[in-house]
């Protein structure tokens, strides 16, 4: 779609983005506030960041969260990529309808239902709740997001390339690894990043499936938010926002550079 | 031979995973929803167990009691929670559409050079924690918060508005959190649209607004539908937003389920709530899946 960019369009874009970004910007600004009150500006200070690194509870929770996110994102990426290949490459197999349903349903399933049902599964099979139950739960819901991201890249991939490799004597698995995987790799990486941030952000499913000793950062933040807004929470949130934003920006720039190089070649 | 095995594994591994961690848990929820509450661990007596075998299960199926569902129907708290969730989700979906459509439209009309940047700016908040974005609104909406300070300073109001801990804050929270989900599918349909169709309609005597309704809006319907479902379905079961931004008067079923489970430790009622919620959402979820499958087919 092209054409003039009218004042109406510019206004709706500006209004929309202001609404999307103003709350986050304000949150970041008030993390540098001197005063304990988060709504009255009393001068610039980084003291809340300093206090944060003294807070053992938050540091422990952050460490748990990072480990859960690393493991669950990696496993979910493998499983999600397999699921995407199954969906795109095998238009007919027994139980495909059920499979498609199980891949798409968790995308919109209310988190309270996913969390409750997984917890009841772990109780039913007598699996001790803690670090691993949270990790398994995160793998399950994020693999579906990975599958959708990879699927959209796979459908536009020319299958004949892989077939050509097979005709030239390459075994199917090797043909996939050498021909298809490099092409869909950017999608696999964004799938991993998506799974990582989903795990990093999740409060509801973690609260249901976690056990003693496995408090994640969102659970910690949530329990403090319930007591009130404090500059320390603003500081934690700012750090998380900074990590995620720089990750997304770096990925976008790398992707752009790759595309440019492709065009040059 | 080798090929057949690799092919099968590609399907079997994720299939088994999802059967075990997605489908089986729902069966367990259903089973517990049909059980009796008991104090202890686990706090329910199952009505049937897999060890009994099919014969016993059939026998017991006849004597299942639906008392948990009866309990949900008898207490107006639960019915009101469902109705109020549907109402809040419905109106916030409309509000999100009213804000999201012009944004998506404006983005699709933007010079093609800055479109990727705009797209990234919509996606970026999606990557940022939901909890953090909801939390950010507390400081803005509360009694001595930034919005009230601004309005008082501008002289628009004399006494601070009460927004936090009311349903208004819940609406703001949902629209804010789910806006990217509305904008992205609408943007992608509008971006692919052929502008010459609108010009043709104008040439044939359509007014500018007429051409918009007859061509642009109609072609954007798949995107609008996908966006609305992506907002509506999770919003019905939302917990974080009503819990942090809403007040004691805010009834939403996700919050009720959470309270039953964590505060009252009533697993059987929590499970029954989850089952009814799923039944309520089955139609929109199937619609969403069909739309997804069709989109995947179209990309082929």
Image (cartoon, coloured by chain):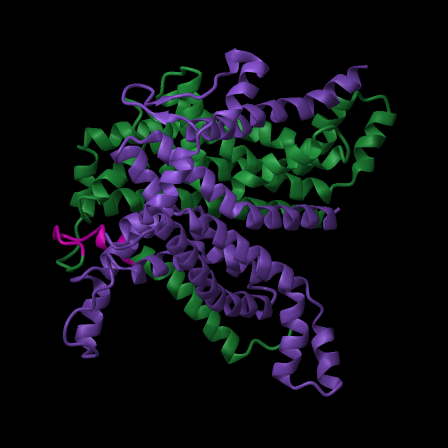
Q: Which chain is purple?
A: B
Residue drawn 37% across the image and 46% down it: B253
Instruction: Examine the rendering and report whether any part of residue A201 can be seen.
Output: no
Give how far across and how far down residue A197 sits, in percent. Answer: 44, 39
B96 relative to A190, above or below = below
Is residue A29 one of those drawn in magenta? Answer: yes
Asked whether, in this view, residue A95 is left or right of residue A67, the answer is right
Which of B187/A102 is in front?
A: A102
Most distant residue in the right direction? A167
Q: Which chain is green?
A: A
Instruction: Examine the rendering and report whether any part of residue B11 can be seen.
Output: yes
Asked whether, in this view, residue A83 is left or right of residue B78, the answer is right
Give how far across and how far down residue A18 sits, in percent. Answer: 38, 65
Residue drawn 67% across the image and 76% down it: B214
Asked whether, in this view, residue A187 is left or right of residue A196, the answer is right
Give how far across and how far down residue A189 sits, in percent. Answer: 56, 36
Badge count:
0
Residue drawn 12% across the image and 53% down it: A35
Which of A178/A199 is in front?
A: A199
Give how far across and how far down residue B291 sits, in percent. Answer: 65, 51
Residue numbers of the magenta segment: A26-38
């Amino acid at each position: 779609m092209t054409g003039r960019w009218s004042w109406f369009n510019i206004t709706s874009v500006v209004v929309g983005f202001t609404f999307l970004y103003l709350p986050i910007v304000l949150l970041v600004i008030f993390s540098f506030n001197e005063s304990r009150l988060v709504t009255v500006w009393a001068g610039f200070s980084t003291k809340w960041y300093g206090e944060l690194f003294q807070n053992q509870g938050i540091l422990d929770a952050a460490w748990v969260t990072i480990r859960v996110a690393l493991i669950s994102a990696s496993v979910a990426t493998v499983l999600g990529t397999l699921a995407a290949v199954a969906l795109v490459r095998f238009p007919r197999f027994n139980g495909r309808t059920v499979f498609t349903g199980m891949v798409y349903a968790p995308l919109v399933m209310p988190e309270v239902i996913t969390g409750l049902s997984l917890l009841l599964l772990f109780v039913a099979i007598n699996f001790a709740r803690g670090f691993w139950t949270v990790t398994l739960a995160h793998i399950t819901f994020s693999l579906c997001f990975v599958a959708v991201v990879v699927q959209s890249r796979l459908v536009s991939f020319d299958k004949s390339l892989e077939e050509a490799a097979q005709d030239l004597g390459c075994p199917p698995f090797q043909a996939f690894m050498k021909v298809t995987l490099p092409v869909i790799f950017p999608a696999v990486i964004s799938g991993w990043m998506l799974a990582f941030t989903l795990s990093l952000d999740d409060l509801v499913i973690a609260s249901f499936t976690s056990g003693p000793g496995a408090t994640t950062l969102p659970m910690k933040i949530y329990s403090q938010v319930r007591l009130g807004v404090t500059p320390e929470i603003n500081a934690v949130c700012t750090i998380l926002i900074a990590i995620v934003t720089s990750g997304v920006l770096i990925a976008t720039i790398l992707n752009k550079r790759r595309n440019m190089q492709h065009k040059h070649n | 031979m080798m090929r057949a095995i690799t092919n099968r594994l590609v399907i079997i591994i994720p299939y088994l995973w999802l059967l075990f961690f997605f489908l089986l848990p729902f069966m367990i929820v259903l089973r517990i929803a049909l059980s009796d509450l008991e104090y202890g661990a686990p706090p329910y007596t199952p009505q049937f167990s897999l060890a009994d075998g099919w014969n016993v299960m059939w026998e017991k199926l006849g004597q299942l009691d639906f008392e948990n569902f009866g309990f949900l129907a008898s207490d107006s708290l639960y019915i009101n929670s469902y109705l109020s969730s549907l109402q809040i989700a419905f109106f916030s979906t409309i509000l999100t559409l009213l804000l999201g459509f012009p944004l998506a439209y404006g983005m699709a009309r933007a010079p093609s050079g800055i479109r990727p940047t705009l797209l990234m700016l919509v996606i970026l908040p999606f990557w940022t924690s939901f909890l953090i974005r909801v939390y950010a609104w507390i400081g803005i909406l509360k009694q001595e918060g930034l919005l009230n300070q601004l309005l008082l300073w501008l002289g628009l109001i004399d006494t601070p508005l009460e927004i936090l801990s009311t349903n208004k804050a819940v609406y703001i929270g949902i629209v804010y959190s789910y806006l990217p989900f509305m904008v992205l599918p609408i943007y992608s349909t509008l971006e692919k649209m052929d502008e010459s169709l609108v010009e043709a309609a104008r040439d044939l005597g359509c007014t500018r607004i007429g051409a918009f309704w007859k061509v642009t809006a109609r072609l954007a319907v798949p995107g609008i539908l996908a966006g609305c479902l992506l907002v509506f379905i999770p919003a019905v079961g939302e917990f974080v937003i009503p819990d942090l931004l809403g007040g004691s008067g805010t009834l939403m079923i996700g919050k009720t389920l959470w309270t039953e489970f964590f505060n009252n430790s009533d697993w059987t009622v929590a499970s029954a709530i989850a089952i009814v919620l799923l039944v309520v959402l089955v139609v929109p979820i199937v619609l969403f899946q069909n739309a997804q499958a069709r989109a995947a087919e179209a990309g082929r």
